[in-house]
Image: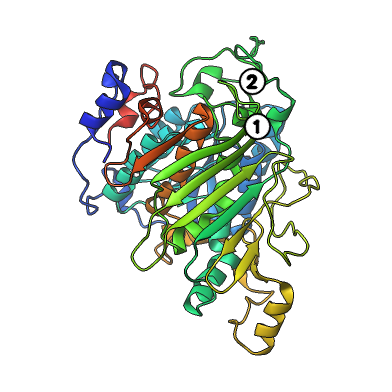
């Protein structure tokens, strides 16, 4: 496990600034905040705060509102008043407004029952940790945390403050494929999986950047509406540039997790949970185009090897990204469907040769699926039609089922806050999925391969990769967030 001794060994003297709780949480500790004693949703709605209200945050705001189960009492965004935040501000004119989530929690922690976090990847950790410690339920966009160690701490906190409901925003976990995967495993359609191929080959923001880069973008004037210092939260200081702002942060290792972090949690999440993949014991960067020290490669192929789990055989998951870095598709694959995929910042995905998705190689069948909640199908299609005619496939989810609604993941979370349901993607489950992505990003960043000890949670043959499990220590003033 990552404890204080291992953390210091990995990260060196600089890590001494970070205080860690080396004790294993019991999982039964009561939340240490007055909010833990509330009857959440006593008036039929949960009093929530929205942190990050532009772009994806706006989409989440609309889906939260559509549930009919939430009363938005606060909104928070470091760029409050900027054009991309104004629509959400107008949606909730009575909500208190903040630019700094710390001030919001200081003033309203006793009133807020749940938060929805839609900020950049790197800032998820301190916001979620603060919410959990306040006894406030938290829904956080994927891929949860940017570093392996931050995910480890967040999982520890979720277990320690067990009365707090947590949910990661991989919406497909409350959609059709989630239930279908379970049913098809029970029916024996999905069994003895030895190979998974996952891919996202759309163009990305960093594809216009120069891989021969030797420094971060030049400093630009900070927008008048923006608190740039709070935006950076615990990370190392960077000068403002529009190339770091809004969705562009996803390009950079210091802030985001690239295509793998953006889409991996939507594409192979059901495989990860129901096949009990856990953490890999080997990760290899087998192909890289445009590798550099600052932003993600133009194309990557990453191989994750998972050992045998009980009666389940060893399995290899291979990830492909990059416009022309396409996977080999099985015979009879058919048409590449976009499936049930939300818009990206209000725009549709561009047409590509192969749409985001996966192929699952089981003992008796090859299956294909798109992203998010899109249903799986058997390759070739004629075989599935035959099995349907012979009633060898469980009945599909009805078209009018509530789980087909785009906001069902938000409904599941809010009902869990009120004690009416179990969260489908709590941090204890989602955190390990995010850690698989963390390990993949380390392989990308160093363009390397390594072996991983699933028990000690250390990279055992590559000290530079092992140091990246924790990364650099937080900025002064943010150390306490790293104490469970």
Residue labelled with disc 1: 247
Do we see residue 43 in this rendering? no
Residue labelled with disc 2: 225
SS class of the residue under badge 2? loop
Image x and y of residue 111, in percent = 41, 44
Q: Nearer the viewer, residue 98 or 336?
A: 336
Image x and y of residue 426, in percent = 42, 54
Whichever of labels 2 and 1 marks the residue nearer the N terminus, that label is: 2
How was this image coloured? rainbow
Q: Residues within 10 Å of mark 2 (few under 14, many from 20)?
A: few
Residue 209 falls in image quadrant: top right
SS class of the residue under badge 1? helix
Name the residue rendered at 37%, 59% in the picture: 308
Report whether 423 appears left or right of 213: left
In the rendered image, the quadrant that contains the N terminus is: top left
Q: Please name which of the two marks, 2 or 1, marks the residue nearer to the observer.
A: 1
Do we see residue 319 in this rendering? yes
Image x and y of residue 371, in percent = 64, 55
Name the residue rendered at 47%, 36% in the picture: 124
Residue 478 falls in image quadrant: top left
Relative to 411, is 480 above or below?
above
Relative to 163, is 130 above or below?
above
Relative to 375, is 338 above or below?
above
Checking the image for residue 145, the label placed there is none
Report whether 128 appears left or right of 64: left
Residue closest to the far bottom: 390
Task: State how many labels appear.
Answer: 2
Relative to 386, is 333 above or below?
above
């Amino acid at each position: 496990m990552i404890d204080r001794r291992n953390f210091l060994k990995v990260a060196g003297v600089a890590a001494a600034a970070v205080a860690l709780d080396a004790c294993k949480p019991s999982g039964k500790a009561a939340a240490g905040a007055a909010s833990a004693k509330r009857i959440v949703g006593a008036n039929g709605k949960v009093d929530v705060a929205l942190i990050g209200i532009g772009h994806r945050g706006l989409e989440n705001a609309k889906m939260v509102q559509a549930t009919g189960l939430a009363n938005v009492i606060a909104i928070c965004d470091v760029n409050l008043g900027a054009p991309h935040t104004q629509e959400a501000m107008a949606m909730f004119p009575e909500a208190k407004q903040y630019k700094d989530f710390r001030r919001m929690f200081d003033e309203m922690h006793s009133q807020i029952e749940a938060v929805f976090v839609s900020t950049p990847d790197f800032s998820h950790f301190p916001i979620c940790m603060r919410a959990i410690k306040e006894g406030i339920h938290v829904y956080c966009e994927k891929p949860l945390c940017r570093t392996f160690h931050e995910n480890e701490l967040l999982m520890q906190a979720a277990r320690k403050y067990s009365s707090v409901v947590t949910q990661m925003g991989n919406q497909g976990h409350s959609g059709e494929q989630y239930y279908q995967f379970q049913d098809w495993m029970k029916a024996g359609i999905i069994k003895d999986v030895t190979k998974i191929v996952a891919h996202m080959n759309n163009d990305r923001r960093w594809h216009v950047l120069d891989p021969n880069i030797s420094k971060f973008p030049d400093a630009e004037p900070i927008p008048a509406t923006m608190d740039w210092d709070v935006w950076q939260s615990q990370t190392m200081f960077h000068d403002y540039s529009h190339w770091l702002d809004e969705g562009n942060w996803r390009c950079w290792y210091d802030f985001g997790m690239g295509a793998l972090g953006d889409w991996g949690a939507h594409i192979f999440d059901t495989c990860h949970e129901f096949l009990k993949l856990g953490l890999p014991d080997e990760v290899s960067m087998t192909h890289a185009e445009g590798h550099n020290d600052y932003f993600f490669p133009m194309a990557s192929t990453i191989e994750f090897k998972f050992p045998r789990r009980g009666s389940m055989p060893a399995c290899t998951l291979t990830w492909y990204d990059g416009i022309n870095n396409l996977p080999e598709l099985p015979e009879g694959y058919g048409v590449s469907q976009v499936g049930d995929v939300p818009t990206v910042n209000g725009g549709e995905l561009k047409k590509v040769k192969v749409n985001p998705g996966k192929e699952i190689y089981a003992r008796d069948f090859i299956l294909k699926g798109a992203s998010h909640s899109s249903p799986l199908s058997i390759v070739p299609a004629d075989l599935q039609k035959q099995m349907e005619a012979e009633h060898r496939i469980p009945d599909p989810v009805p078209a009018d089922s509530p789980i087909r609604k785009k906001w069902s993941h938000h409904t599941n979370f809010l009902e869990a806050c009120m004690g009416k349901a179990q969260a489908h993607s709590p941090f204890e489950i989602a955190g390990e999925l995010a850690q698989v992505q963390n390990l993949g990003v380390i392989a990308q960043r160093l363009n390397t391969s390594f072996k991983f000890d699933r028990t000690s949670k250390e990279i055992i043959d590559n000290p530079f990769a092992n140091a990246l499990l924790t990364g650099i220590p937080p900025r002064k003033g943010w150390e306490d967030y790293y104490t469970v």
